[in-house]
Image (tube, grey):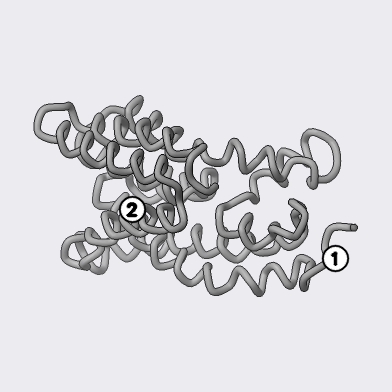
Amino acid sequence: MRSGVGRGGGYLAGARAGLPFALVVGVVAFSFGALARSLGWGVIAPIAFSVATFSVTAQFAVATVLGAGGGAFTAIAAAVLLNARFLPIGISVAPFLRGGPFRRALEGQTIVTTSWALAIRDGGRFDRAFMIGATVPQYAAWTVGTAIGVLAHDVGGSVEKLGLDAIFPAFFLALLMRGLGGSGKRAIAAAVIAAVLAAALVPVAPSGVPVLAASGAALLGLRGGSS
């Protein structure tokens, strides 16, 4: 079957399916931009970070660790561990990407969790065009939302005044609850271990280390839980 054929397949169909998620992504991106600006990142750095990275979990991790006074190495390590799920996801999608190494690498950058889930088809196949189409509005919402959040900081003040500081813990909690839905005992055990480990390290470990340790512990659930 050619890419774009199937359950309403194609770039445009994927873009339409991605629009509802783009609305949520835009709100989260706004909070990230406002927080990054409040941490002293300036105007250009948060926007460039979103344009080049486009990873909600990774960027949240970096902002959280650096905001707590952690080092760059700890922030990067936590982001890498949180995004480790994209290794098996990328392997599953790789056979359906097109072109040579450079084009395939570019298409691989469109893999985000929601688009990947939307593009799954029967028999372990993926609708490549649908996945790419679903990612486009989310990417646009993430970059534009970040820019608006950065600029809004000058108007609205701190993230605490805007009430955006609550979005970060709420977002991570939502990720945890979604990840545990339908997961096996191994994944649930890994989540519990990660939470306990982070709580135990907060009073004694340097800033960022609890996030890093919890991310590493959560990797134990990759094979036990659903992707």
Residue 173 seen in the current view: yes
Which type of secondary structure does the marked residue at label 1 adopt?
Answer: loop
Amino acid type, callout 1: Val
Q: Position of residue 57 (x, y in %)?
A: 42, 47
> Vertical placement of 20 versus 88: above or below?
below
Q: Position of residue 95 (x, y in %)?
A: 79, 41
Residue 45 seen in the current view: no
Labels 1 and 2: the sequence-earlier one: 1
Residue at (48% x, 72% y) in the render: 23
Residue 215 lies left or right of residue 122; in this view the side is left
Q: According to the image, label 1 marks what residue?
A: 5
Residue 135 lies left or right of residue 126; in this view the side is left
Amino acid type, callout 2: Phe
Q: According to the image, label 2 marks what residue?
A: 172
Residue 72 lies left or right of residue 98; in this view the side is left
Q: How many marks?
A: 2
Q: Residue furthest front?
A: 185
Q: Quadrant of residue 148?
A: bottom left
Residue at (46% x, 56% y) in the render: 182
Q: Position of residue 224 (x, y in %)?
A: 48, 40
Crowding near the residue tagged with mark 2, few <14, some 14–19, many ≥20 C-alpha atoms within 10 Å? some
